[in-house]
Amino acid sequence: MWVINKNWKRNPIWRVHSDKISQKVYEFLHDRGLAEVDKESWDWILMEEKTSLLYMSLLAKYLADVNPDFTVPGTDRNEYEKMIYRASSHHNSFVSLDTKFMNVLPIPRQDIPISNILRFKRKRRDELLHFREVIDNVYRDISTAEDQNEIKQIVISHKERIEREIKELKRMMKEENIKIVFGSLKSLLDIKSPTFLTALGTSIAQIPIQVQIPILGITAAIQIGCYLVDKRNLQRARLRKSPFAYLYHAETERVI
């Protein structure tokens, strides 16, 4: 447990909006020196960095159970991903496919106002839904594959369509004057093939699948591997017909 001492302002402090934390939870953290009200703005709670990241990760995870169709839990910090999802052993765990679109997804830079992003999402809603449908189709086919060779063929067969869709998404964002970086999209998929699930359940080894996708001079890739998930996540995994966890990683050094 990390504690905010008398010199807490010298430590990394994060702000969490008061609407995202109940009074009972705030009092629990405050009594342990992990949170306090921001006296400069009463709408915000000052929280110790690691406590804040863990709390927001767990909040997203359980909010996804309330509205599984529109809310997905996510984090770009590996240590918190492991804390929430990964199992330490085969005991009380299940196998999932770990699907990564590496350095592929155009995402807004951190300096883009949230109002611009929301306006873009409203204006381009139909196109964004189409893009999600394309990715969901890839996930659906991968999750029903019978073996590793079939997964590789599925990825290759979808390669050109994914490339076209990503180029179109980049073009739309450029038209709306939204500067981007290329990030990565990670998803954990249910395995629907009993034969494949049995094979993976006896030997958790990385599936050596990687397909390169050169997009506008940037080397991107699709990687497929295995992920051992804590069984406490089984229910929320079943709530989702598609992936049950999205993780975005911005590659800020590749600003365009």
Image (spheres, grey):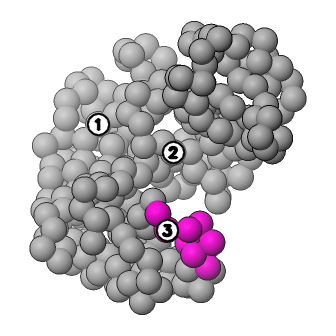
Q: Measure how far apart labels 1 and 2 are at the Cα level.
A: 18 Å
State the residue at coordinates (86%, 24%): 24
> Which numbered disc covers residue 74?
2
- Judge whether residue 118 is colored magenta: yes
Q: Position of residue 111 (x, y in %)?
A: 47, 63
Look at the image and give the residue range highlighted in magenta.
111-119
Label 1, secondary structure: give it. Answer: strand
Q: Position of residue 247 (x, y in %)?
A: 43, 48
Q: Is residue 214 left or right of residue 62?
A: left
Quadrant location of the N terminus?
top right
Query: Which numbered disc, 2 or 3, marks the residue closer to the eye?
Result: 3
Q: Kindly identify which residue carries mark 3.
A: 112
State the residue at coordinates (77%, 18%): 30
Image vertical order of residue 60 relative to residue 152, above or below? above
Q: Measure how far apart labels 3 and 1 are at the Cα level.
A: 35 Å
> Which numbered disc covers residue 226?
1
Callout 3 amino acid: Ile
> Which numbered disc covers residue 131?
none
Q: Position of residue 157 (x, y in %)?
A: 20, 71
Q: Is residue 170 left or right of residue 159?
A: right
Q: Is residue 65 visible?
A: no
State the residue at coordinates (27%, 32%): 200
Q: Position of residue 79 (x, y in %)?
A: 41, 27
Image vertical order of residue 138 relative to residue 89, above or below? below
Callout 1 amino acid: Cys
